[in-house]
Image (cartoon, rainbow, N blue to C red):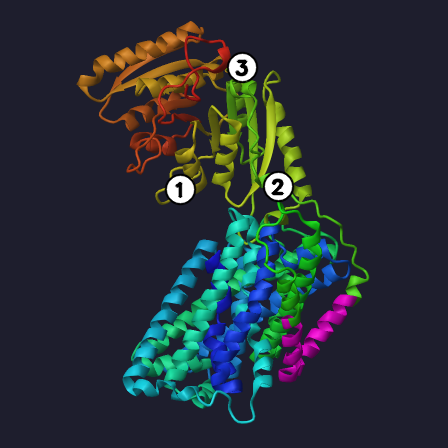
Amino acid sequence: MTMIGVGAMIGTSIFVLIGVTTREVGAAVMLVFVLNALATVFTAGTYAELGSTFPEAGGGYLWAKKGLRHPAAFMSGWMSWFGHTVACSYYGLGLGYAVVAFAGYFGIDLFGMSDEIVVKVFAAGAIIFFLGVNYAGVGATGKAGSTITLIQILILTFFIAFAVLYALDAKGVEVVDNFTPIFPEDKGLTDVFMVMGFTIITFEGYEIIVQCGEEVKNPKKNVPRAIFLSVLVAAILYLSVAFACLANFTPEWIGNEGENAVTSVSQHVIPYFGAPLVILGGVLSAMAALNATVFSSSRVSFAMGRDKSLPKLFGSIHRKRRVPHNAIMITGLIMLFMAIFFPLEVVVASTSIMFLLLFTLANAASIKLRRRLTKIDIGFKTPLFPLFPVAGMIFSIVIAGYLYLFMPVAWYITAVWVAVGLALSAFAKPSEEYRSIVERRRVPQKPLPREKIEKYRVFLALGDLGDLRLVETAGIIARYFKGDLTVNNVVEVPRAMPLEAISKDYVDEIAQGLKKAVKVAPSTVDVRPVVSVSYYVPGAILDQIKHEAANLLVLGWKGTKRRGRTILGRNLDEVVRRAPCDVAIIKTKRLSKNIERILVVSGRYFETRKALLLALPIAKEYGASIEILAVITDDRQVALAKGNAERLSKMCSRVNVAHEVHYLRSKSLVAAVQQELKKTDLLVMGAGAQTAIERTLFGASYDRIIRTADVPVLVLKTTNVGKTGLPGGIAFPQFMPPGRTT
């Protein structure tokens, strides 16, 4: 969480804005960042309180909707949308300036284009590229973003250390000479306040932290901590980089370098690779910020379209890609317009004004909401209430007002956007509360009653609602052991989207499809369909298994060929390895009701016996016969193989299932099984738990068999928890079904 905030705060600003700010106020650039950090603390405190109390995507828009009357909530969302959108334009321009610095350093002629045209072309190209990335639903994960932020911090730390040491070696105690006079001629505190508004964007990254609140464990503790830590780290980095630059060069020189000041300083103080290193940091920063904010900028417009504040097309989700494609497209057009037709200073100022106005409304909502909340509701509480929200409102309004003196064009753009928003708000019909499905992702913590726990429970993770044979097979197993069946379908949400982006109507549609699918299960089985919504499919399945106290997990696999180290696929492999109960993996390719012959491979007795217990109900259901195949690869195994096969044969005899035992000598278990598959309708195998150092899922031989077999396969993987007992006095006492430990 902290890395998300730091990454958004330093972004491209730390490489681009230090030179621009120094050009305006000279050595007072240090004072600008100190005052901005202090002013930020108050609104950051408000965001920490509300973000920990309402850990949901939406931020200021959500709080204004809960605490203020219409049209305040509409305008909060309207301004938040524009603020995030124009921030993307700014990040695109930052990437363009990094390209210019790169070309200039290496003497590359980019088709004879001027620097200004190069900036615009690469900014537009980067924006279009990341719009496409997010439309495809493959935006970078938080882990990747944190890695890039860590690289940025390491590059900046290296630059600061090198620059300060260089200055001390070259100037000694005279290193502070460039800090006086603090103000250039004809400049003063008024100019500092004006530039504060221009650079407030450097500290607005904590707003993104609260957008991720619903993904955070223990948000009441972690959201406030991440917000304040990110502000502290960002302030230290900005002050350190500004100090490192001023320690080596005069404010006039740094100001003349403008957007490329940090790159130019690194070129002088770090021989050979200083400039390329800083340029790399700028490019990585811009790319990470673009990838993260392109989608976050469309979140608010999507949310407003979803609750009818904006036209319905904003709230629509692409049925295949599961992304808000219309919101992304419209947001992208605004990004491109601002990046192409306005200079960097106007784009930055417009972004800052929008966020300052948004912060004002968020602080106002905080005052209203505090009175309605109990001590149980509130996470972090700002001290000396209402000092923080009132001070935050005053600072935001004053800084935004001073910004008019510095960049009036930005205020004109803001005025037009606000006027359009006010006009649209008259036609907006926002719903009081959008029907959110966020709660569906949380597994209920209420324990199951004893009678439910003692009953045998089969859990089917159904990825394809059309896989009816899989549902039928799981139902047959549950019926045989007089147990219950839970059929679970997980709606996966892309990491870049809030969970509530998936409408309840869509989830209800999935639920209806699931209810139809479970009708093929035997009528005597108590079947419970469950739809979960999650960013992380394996985690959702495993959490639900634990809540259900399942004895047996059933998974379907279509037999798709995989490359690399995965056996069944990344998600399935992880579920199989981490499942707290026995797992039956059914390769559903060509699985049908025409099962006449079942081949059971006799391996270690404990695992094979449990696998046979699943084959028996299938054999009885379809009138199939069972062949027990004992492959002897070593003469020393003859007695053991025959003993195990005979015991398995007795199991079949006790329930009157036709069977035969086949002994086969072979040097290869895989080759022997593949030979027998030619006359088999279903292959059944039992595998034990693998050790932590083994890279196989079921054992090397079984992994090869399940991947290459051209017939349906059922593999039972037992847990490493020892032998299992039969729950609740279920019939069939001679043999224990796979399941919970006693």
Q: Which mark is residue 562?
A: 1
- Which quarter of the figure has residue 577? top left
Q: Which residues are magenta?
A: 395-422
How would you rate the neighbour count of disc 1 (Cα within 10 Å): few for under 14, some for 14-19, many for 20 or more?
A: few
Give the labeled residue for mark 2. Answer: 439
**Residue 444's spot in the image, x, y percent?**
57, 34
Residue 605: say if magenta.
Answer: no
**Residue 602's spot in the image, x, y percent?**
32, 18
Circles 2 and 1, Cβ within 8 Å, touching? The answer is no
* Secondary element at tag 2: helix
Q: Amino acid at mark 2?
A: Glu
Regarding residue 415, the answer to whether it shows in the image is: yes
Magenta residues: mostly which secondary structure? helix
Q: Amino acid at mark 3?
A: Lys
Tell me how far mark 2 sits from mark 3, CA to CA. 32 Å
- State left or right for residue 91 relative to residue 598: right
Which sits in the foreground, 464 or 374? 374
Question: Considering only vertical position in the picture, is 279 above or below 622?
Answer: below
Q: Which mark is residue 482?
A: 3
Residue 408: say if magenta.
Answer: yes
Which sits in the foreground, 98 or 432? 432
Judged by depth in the image, the label closer to the viewer, 3 or 1, is 3
